[in-house]
Image: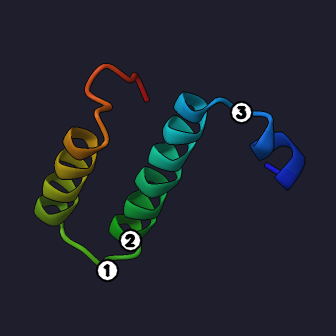
Amino acid sequence: MDQLEWEQLSPEQKRIQLYLEQKKTLEMFLEHGAISQAQFDKSLGDLTEKMGMNGIAT
């Protein structure tokens, strides 16, 4: 997503995009063995709760 696209998003859309990027980072860490499955589950759960993404299907 380029800067112009980002600027055109609503605050809610930006929050969702940030969440998805952070989730993707956690998935990459897990895939490369940088974190365990337990760490991934805990971090994703915390991220989801703190960002209010419980209702977001990803």
Q: Amino acid at mark 2?
A: Phe
Assign a secondary structure to mark 1: loop
Q: Residues within 10 Å of mark 3 (few under 14, many from 20)?
A: few
Give the amino acid type for the residue marked by disc 1 in the picture: Ala
x and y, in percent, of residue 56 in the image: 38, 23
Q: Earlier in the sequence, mark 2 or mark 3?
A: 3
Q: Residue at x 11, y 60 (%)?
A: 38
Tell me which residue sits at (13%, 55%) in the image: 42
Residue at which label 1 appears: 34
Q: Which mark is residue 13?
A: none
- Kindly identify which residue carries mark 2: 29
Residue kind at label 3, given as amino acid type:
Leu
Q: Would you identify the image quadrant in which residue 6 lies?
A: top right
Circles 1 and 2 in contact, beta carbons < 8 Å: yes
- Residue shown at 39%/66% (left/top)? 31
* Disc 1 crowd, CA 10 A, few/some/many (<14, 14-19, 20+): few
> Of tags 2 and 3, which is closer to the observer?
3
Residue at (38, 71) in percent of width and height:
29
**SS at mark 2 in the image:** helix
Query: Disc 3 or disc 1, which is closer to the eye?
Result: 3
Provide residue 36's location: percent of width, then percent of height: 18, 69
